[in-house]
Structure formats: C-alpha cells, structure tokens
Amino acid sequence: MSERILLVEDERDLAMIVSDTLRDLGYGVVVAYDGVAGLEMFGEGSFDIVVADIMMPRLDGFEMARRIRRISPSVPLLFLTARSGIDDIETGFEIGANDYLKKPFELRELVVRIKALLRRHRGGDATTGGEKIYEIGLYRFDRGAQTLTLGPKVRELSHIEAILLGVLASNLGKTVAASELMTAVWQRDDIYNRNSLHGFIHKLRRALSQDSRIAIINQRGVGYMLVVR
C-alpha cells in the first residue's frame, strides 16, 4: 500500500504539478485547496504526511496545523511558504511543523524532504524516543502522549518540545550535539533551526523549573545535556 499524502495548497496550478509528481513516484495524494477542506479531509482519512501552504483562504495553514496536532500529535507536517521571516518559521515550528520549504522551490527538494520525514516517522524510537515514559526528577514524561506530569498537574508539550525532551531524556547525563537535536526535529542544521532550537530549549527549562535539581546545560559550541542533580 502506498504512503498517503494530504496536500493542502490553494494555488491550483502548483497543487496539480506537485500532486502529479508525487503520484508518478507511487504516493497516494489527496488534494485540498483551503484549510477548512484540508482539515475535513484529514479527519476523514488516514495520512502518512501533511504538506500544506500557510497563506490560504477560509483557514490558514497555521490554524489548520494547530487543529491537526490535536487530532494527531505525530503525523509529519511540512509547510510550503512564501514567507521568509524567522518569526513565521518559528511560529510554524512552535505549532508542531516538522519542516518548511520556501517558495519557489525545486520539486526534487520537496520530494527529498518528504522522503526524509516519512523515513523518520517510520523509524519511531530510533530518533525520537518512541512511546517511552521517562522519570525526570519529580516529573513523569510520556513521550507518546506528549505530556509532562508533576503531581496532579499535567502539561501538554508541543510536538517539537516532546521530540527534543525525548532525545535529551534518552541521553540523560550525556551531551547531545546541537546538530543531532536539529536533525531529529528538522532533518538539517541551518541558522534558522539553530535559533529555533535555543528557543525550544528555553521553553523546556521553564516546563521543568518546578524541580530545582533538573537542568538543561548548554555545552557551548557543542550541544545540550539534561541532568538531575
């Protein structure tokens, strides 16, 4: 059975070119032309990856992605965007996007990105810690549910926060290279991802701040280490 892709793109000519290319490669492709239709199709079908534009009528890609993440915390999500500002890229990652590709783009690059996301998603435990549960000091981290529990309080983590904490928790007391963390989340290391990584580490520090024994140490120029003193 071929892997199924939900393509949500309001530029119909581009949607046709992309969908035809992916079908020629053996993928099953369903196309929606706005965020509302994309969300409805996602709820009705089973998809291995979502490829979506950001600027769309009725419901933009950001809001559509937020709602998709409530339904499926782990489905790979790749944004296509004409926006180039770091704020928009960070917003996409915060929502739970796994990757982004700026327009105009080469179809070959899109295919490479899709294959990388599908490969990582199939790999599960090898890159993200899978569905494991970790005890981190006073906290209980459920990788599959993407939750961090302290006593009666349960905090939902974003998709990217859960990936990063999963990698750090599975290497407790060991330094994880920044490039390894970025590859686990975004499949590559570039300046945009490096800036975003710092921001997500800061969010994780705040999420774990109720236990003073826990620290995420910045090994400058190398990476990060999660420790429980």
Image (tube, rainbow, N blue to C red):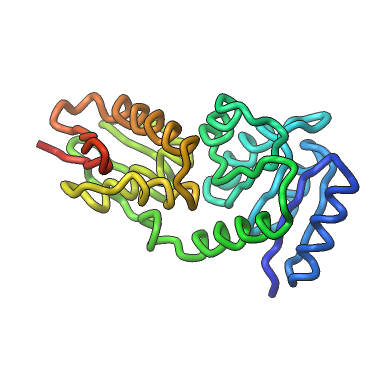
The picture places residue 101, in percent across and down from the top left corner, at 64, 44
The picture places residue 123, in percent across and down from the top left corner, at 46, 65
Between residues 69 and 151, which one lies in front from this camera angle? Answer: 69
Between residues 107 and 136, which one lies in front from this camera angle? Answer: 107
**Is 28 left, or right, of 86 in this rendering?**
right
The image quadrant that residue 61 belongs to is top right
The picture places residue 189, in percent across and down from the top left corner, at 45, 46
* Outermost residue toward the bottom in this view: 1
> Is 4 drawn above or below residue 189 in the view shown?
below
> Is 73 drawn above or below residue 55 in the view shown?
below
The picture places residue 77, in percent across and down from the top left corner, at 61, 47
The image quadrant that residue 86 belongs to is top right
* Outermost residue toward the left in this view: 229
**Is 56 left, or right, of 201 in this rendering?**
right
Q: How many marks?
A: 0
Between residues 2 and 181, which one lies in front from this camera angle? Answer: 181
For image coordinates 42% across by 37% down, the residue present is 194
Q: Quadrant of the N terminus?
A: bottom right
**Is 150 left, or right, of 142 in this rendering?**
left
Q: Quadrant of the C terminus?
A: top left
Between residues 135 and 216, which one lies in front from this camera angle? Answer: 216
For image coordinates 43% across by 46% down, the residue present is 145
For image coordinates 68% across by 30% down, the residue present is 83
